[in-house]
Image (cartoon, helix red, strand yellow):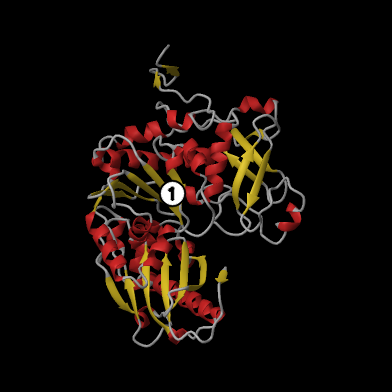
């Protein structure tokens, strides 16, 4: 949707910040004289039709002589349409937009520039270009002032793009000695960990599952998607909230409020919530298995597809979370936690001082519930925060600040990209991280904030049966 802060036809010039993400396109317009942001908007990236993840899009581009051109044209048309529509609604002639900043994930960056991303389809995941670049706007079909340039912020390497660099700058990474962890959740999850002078980055093989991909009731962060859910630990009844309404499903007026919102499944924050709530309510065990015996106490738990399912909404549309969904979510989140542990090992640190969660436009991730599912190693919850749209805010910071652009270029140059799956410890780390929050590690800092059954240190017997260290 479009959000316009002010309409003023007297504005002489404007600057543009553009985030061409793998799932969402975001754009901001700022007054060229005051720097005040006057309008913001976002739409779903049209390339999702060619696959939810970047590798699928690379495969599509390789499948025919004109496929890459097709994707490039479609993406440029979407960018141009978004910019033009926002300028019109903000009351600005598009020729008043005199410059801009551009960030993207590597594959989308290459596609919008008309560069072949095929080398990003397999190791060593080489970018055609990674350095900062000034691009004539007309070359990518973006309607701006004649001669206007878009400054493309630098890519890091592999599948870590300029969006990760902008997010890292925005949250202050690498400025002091504290060990900071940044997790940017999207179709591609990007992780940066480190302290001053020691920054390590990875794009773990988490897939698009935490962004709703491959989940029966998964959705993008659009109006009508469930962004928060709570499960009563006694009755096991759920109540939920959707993007576009502040009401919970058990509040008066909810049905009327969501009638036009296309009520549907879970977006990224909702998926994290439902996984955590199933664990906190006792409906799901530490290993991610739904307790089918609870079907004797609640009709919400039922046997379907020869396994258990938790029914959230028994109406049209039906919304449920299946055991298959839970396993897919465990695989995705375990890849993230395992990658974090590998990066921490490379850094030489013992613990993490600060965790920052972020993502594209949509809904806020609850730090507590992210900790419950084990998205990251145990950390004091007071030091875990969600920063909305850190990448986009970083791009906006670079609009009028050459020092910010230089700082981001330095960040990109100083990040060491780690292919975590090549680390000999990765597989064992991921197996351990399949547990919620971990298969064998206790989370004592989390335990001081919330009661979580079965949250102690554990070892496993030869058949995988769990027993405590004390017995």
In the current view of this chain or complex, which residue is farthest to the front?
Answer: 34
Report whether residue 267 is seen: yes
Q: Which residue is mark 1?
A: 357
In the current view of this chain or complex, which residue is farthest to the top?
Answer: 471
**Residue 328 in picture, x, y percent from top left:** 48, 41
Q: Who's the residue at 42% across and 27% down the image?
A: 442
| Nearest the eye: 227 or 121 | 227
The part of the image, by quadrant, that contains residue 31 is bottom left
- Position of the N terminus, as image quadrant, is bottom right
Judge the density around disc 1: few (<14), some (14-19), many (≥20) Cα neighbours within 10 Å. Answer: many
**Residue 77 in picture, x, y percent from top left:** 46, 76
Q: Who's the residue at 65% across and 46% down the image?
A: 240
Q: Who's the residue at 37% across and 66% down the image?
A: 103
Question: What secondary structure is found at the residue carrying circle 1?
Answer: strand
Left or right: residue 159 versus residue 388 is left
Report whether residue 64 is seen: no
**Residue 152 in picture, x, y percent from top left:** 32, 70
| Nearest the eye: 454 or 98 | 98
Report the label total: 1
Left or right: residue 44 versus residue 125 is right
The part of the image, by quadrant, that contains residue 281 is top right
The part of the image, by quadrant, that contains residue 109 is bottom left
| Vertical side of 428 occupied by 186: above or below | below
- Position of the C terminus, as image quadrant, is top left
**Residue 464 in picture, x, y percent from top left:** 42, 21
């Amino acid at each position: 949707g479009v959000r316009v802060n002010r309409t003023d036809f007297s504005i002489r010039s404007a600057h543009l910040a553009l985030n061409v993400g793998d799932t969402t396109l975001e754009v901001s317009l700022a007054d060229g004289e005051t720097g005040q942001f006057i309008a913001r908007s976002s739409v779903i990236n049209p390339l999702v039709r060619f696959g939810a993840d970047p590798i699928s899009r690379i495969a599509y581009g390789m499948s025919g002589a004109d496929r890459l051109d097709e994707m490039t044209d479609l993406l440029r048309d979407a960018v141009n349409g978004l910019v033009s529509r926002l300028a019109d609604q903000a009351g600005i002639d598009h020729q008043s937009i005199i410059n801009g900043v551009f960030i993207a994930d590597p594959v989308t960056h290459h596609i919008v520039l008309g560069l072949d991303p095929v080398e990003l389809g397999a190791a060593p995941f080489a970018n055609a270009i990674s350095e900062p670049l000034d691009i004539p706007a007309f070359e990518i079909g973006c309607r701006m002032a004649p001669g206007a340039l878009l400054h493309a912020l630098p890519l890091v390497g592999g599948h870590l793009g300029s969006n990760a660099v902008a997010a890292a700058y925005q949250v202050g990474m690498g400025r002091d000695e504290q060990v900071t962890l940044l997790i940017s959740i999207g179709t591609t999850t990007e992780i940066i960990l480190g302290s001053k002078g020691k920054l390590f980055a990875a794009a773990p093989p988490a897939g698009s599952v935490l962004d709703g991909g491959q989940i029966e009731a998964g959705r993008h962060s659009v109006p009508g998607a469930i962004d928060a859910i709570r499960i009563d630990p006694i009755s096991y009844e759920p109540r939920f909230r959707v993007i576009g309404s502040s009401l919970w499903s058990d509040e008066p007026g909810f049905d009327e409020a969501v009638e036009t919102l296309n009520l549907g499944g879970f977006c990224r924050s909702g998926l994290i919530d439902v996984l955590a709530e199933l664990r906190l309510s006792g409906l799901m065990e530490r290993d991610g298995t739904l307790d089918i015996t609870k079907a004797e106490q609640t009709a919400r738990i039922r046997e379907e597809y020869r396994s258990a399912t938790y029914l959230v909404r028994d109406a049209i549309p039906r919304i449920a979370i299946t055991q298959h969904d839970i396993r897919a979510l465990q695989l995705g989140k375990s890849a993230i936690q395992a990658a974090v542990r590998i990066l921490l090992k490379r850094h030489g640190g013992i613990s993490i001082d600060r965790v920052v969660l972020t993502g594209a436009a949509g809904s806020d991730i609850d730090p507590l519930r992210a900790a419950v599912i084990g998205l990251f190693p145990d950390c004091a919850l007071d030091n875990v925060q969600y920063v909305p749209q850190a990448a986009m805010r970083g791009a906006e910071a670079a609009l009028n600040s050459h020092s910010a652009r230089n700082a981001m270029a330095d960040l990109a140059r100083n990040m060491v990209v780690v292919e975590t799956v090549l680390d000999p410890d990765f597989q064992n780390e991921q197996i351990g991280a399949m547990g919620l929050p971990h298969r064998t590690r206790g989370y004592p800092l989390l335990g001081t904030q919330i009661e979580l059954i079965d949250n102690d240190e554990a070892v496993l017997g030869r058949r995988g049966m769990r027993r405590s260290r004390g017995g």
